[in-house]
């Protein structure tokens, strides 16, 4: 299992790149399903090719130990395999190891295609569990992973679910057979030349710092030196980004709490002020990223912010969300609640009415740090999906280029949760 012949003629048909699931107990290896899928895929390829006895049709790192030799072995297999098979999951695109494997193979692919008119289709994803479309990195968006011969439930359930549910196992076998057929066809048609093994230790993950995974967090709040008369300073700092509306229960600025959650969901957070990020927030062109405004209700009547907030409301960009912390222990907010809500509705009526329930609930006033953290996750998902829908309505203005395709040319695009 997992290896390659010394004879270059029998380089593996595929390299299986997957994200390991950590153990939760000692009773069962959580990666057993991946190992079974690898065996099943190898079996189907053996049945459809003339590989000699003892020559493995694929490579998986299950028999390797970490260390220098492990790096060298991975580099060798990535330099010789015919097809790269990333096993898509939410964990996959957050794995540095998987990003390094992708980068190493893609380097070889690009070296082979330099000066040629088209790229070979030598990356064939396998859909392990459903992944929200907005979590897919930019470099994956031109790669089709849905084909009719993979079966009717492949995309909506993924191989893992098809494998686990008894009545779906016929669908699982059909999907595996379809992948095997596709791998063989591409491997033999393209015949990607072997390359020199890369310096695997120093290669950078393909998923690190992807600009298409930016998520803007805009803090609209005063500082400790620009507060309205009488407003308590304990919630503010030297910069807008220091605003901590849930003090003392919240021990960190709210933007940092939001950034951690955004990062967990696969984006690269970028914290800034309304004035710093105004161009992206107010643009009517193709969106550059989804974004979230963290709004101090006291800021709405501030002349420094009111004009820009009205412009934001008129732009009404659905990929820009609004979230209003409204601490239940802030007595000044309670005392001025009617006045603050009147200003909010006058300045931001469109944004307050915008979106699905998860987004609308966020603008009614979030009472605690715990509620903030629970509310933010569905809001980020909704905004990510809205960004992806809207960016696809602006096809690139380069002759001869088409939109990225995330689905089969014969199918309608799949709808994600939170998408309308």
Image (cartoon, rainbow, N blue to C red):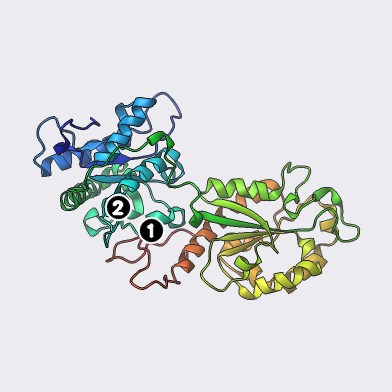
**Residue in view at x 87 percent, y 56 percent:** 231
Q: Decide if residue 37 is in sight here.
A: no
* Picture disc at residue 141: 1
- Most extreme residue toward the right, as rendered? 230
- Foreground pick, 183 / 354: 183
The spot of residue 409 in percent (x, y) is 28, 65
Q: Decide if residue 303 is in sight here.
A: yes
Which of the 4 quarters of the picture holds residue 250?
top right
Kindly state the secondary structure of the residue where label 1 is placed: loop
- Foreground pick, 238 / 263: 238
Per the image, the residue denoted by label 2 is 154
Callout in the foreground (1, 2): 1
Marks 1 and 2, how far apart in space? Answer: 18 Å
Dot 1 or dot 2, earlier in sequence: 1
- The count of marks equals 2
- Most extreme residue toward the bottom, as rendered? 314
Check the image and report above or below for 16 versus 266.
above
Check the image and report above or below for 30 versus 357.
above
């Amino acid at each position: 299992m997992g290896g390659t012949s010394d004879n270059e003629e029998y380089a593996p048909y595929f390299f299986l790149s997957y994200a390991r699931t950590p153990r939760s107990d000692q009773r069962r290896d959580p990666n057993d399903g991946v190992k079974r899928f690898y065996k099943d895929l190898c079996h189907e390829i053996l049945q459809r090719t003339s590989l000699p006895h003892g020559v493995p049709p694929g490579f998986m790192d299950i028999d390797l130990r970490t260390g220098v030799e492990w790096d060298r072995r991975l580099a060798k297999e990535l330099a010789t395999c015919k097809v790269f098979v990333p096993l898509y999951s939410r964990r996959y695109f957050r794995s540095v190891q998987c990003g390094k494997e992708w980068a190493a193979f893609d380097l070889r692919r690009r070296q082979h295609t330099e000066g040629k008119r088209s790229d070979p289709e030598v990356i064939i994803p396998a859909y392990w569990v459903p992944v929200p479309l907005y979590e897919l990195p930019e470099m994956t968006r031109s790669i089709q992973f849905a084909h009719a011969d993979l079966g009717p439930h492949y995309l909506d359930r993924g191989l893992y679910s098809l494998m686990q549910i008894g009545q779906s196992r016929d669908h699982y076998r059909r999907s595996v057979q379809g992948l095997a057929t596709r791998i063989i066809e591409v491997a033999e048609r393209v015949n990607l030349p072997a390359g020199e093994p890369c310096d695997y230790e120093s290669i950078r993950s393909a998923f690190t710092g992807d600009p298409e995974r930016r998520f803007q967090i805009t803090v609209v709040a005063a500082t400790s030196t620009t507060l309205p008369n009488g407003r308590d300073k304990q919630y503010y700092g030297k910069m807008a980004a220091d605003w901590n509306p849930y003090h003392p229960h919240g021990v960190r600025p709210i933007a940092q709490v939001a950034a951690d959650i955004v990062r967990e969901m696969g984006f690269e957070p970028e914290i800034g002020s309304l004035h710093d990020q105004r161009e992206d927030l107010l643009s009517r062109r193709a969106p550059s990223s989804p974004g979230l405004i963290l709004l101090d209700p006291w800021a709405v009547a501030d002349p420094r912010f009111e004009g820009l907030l009205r412009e934001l409301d008129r732009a009404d960009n659905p990929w820009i969300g609004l979230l209003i912390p409204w601490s239940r222990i802030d007595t000044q907010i309670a005392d001025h609640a009617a006045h603050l809500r009147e200003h909010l509705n006058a300045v931001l009526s469109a944004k307050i009415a915008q979106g699905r329930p998860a987004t609308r609930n966020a603008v009614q006033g979030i009472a605690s740090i715990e509620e903030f953290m629970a509310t933010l996750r569905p809001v980020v998902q909704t905004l990510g999906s809205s960004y992806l829908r809207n960016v696809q309505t602006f096809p690139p203005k380069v002759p001869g280029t088409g939109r990225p395709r995330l689905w089969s040319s014969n199918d309608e695009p799949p709808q994600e949760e939170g998408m309308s």
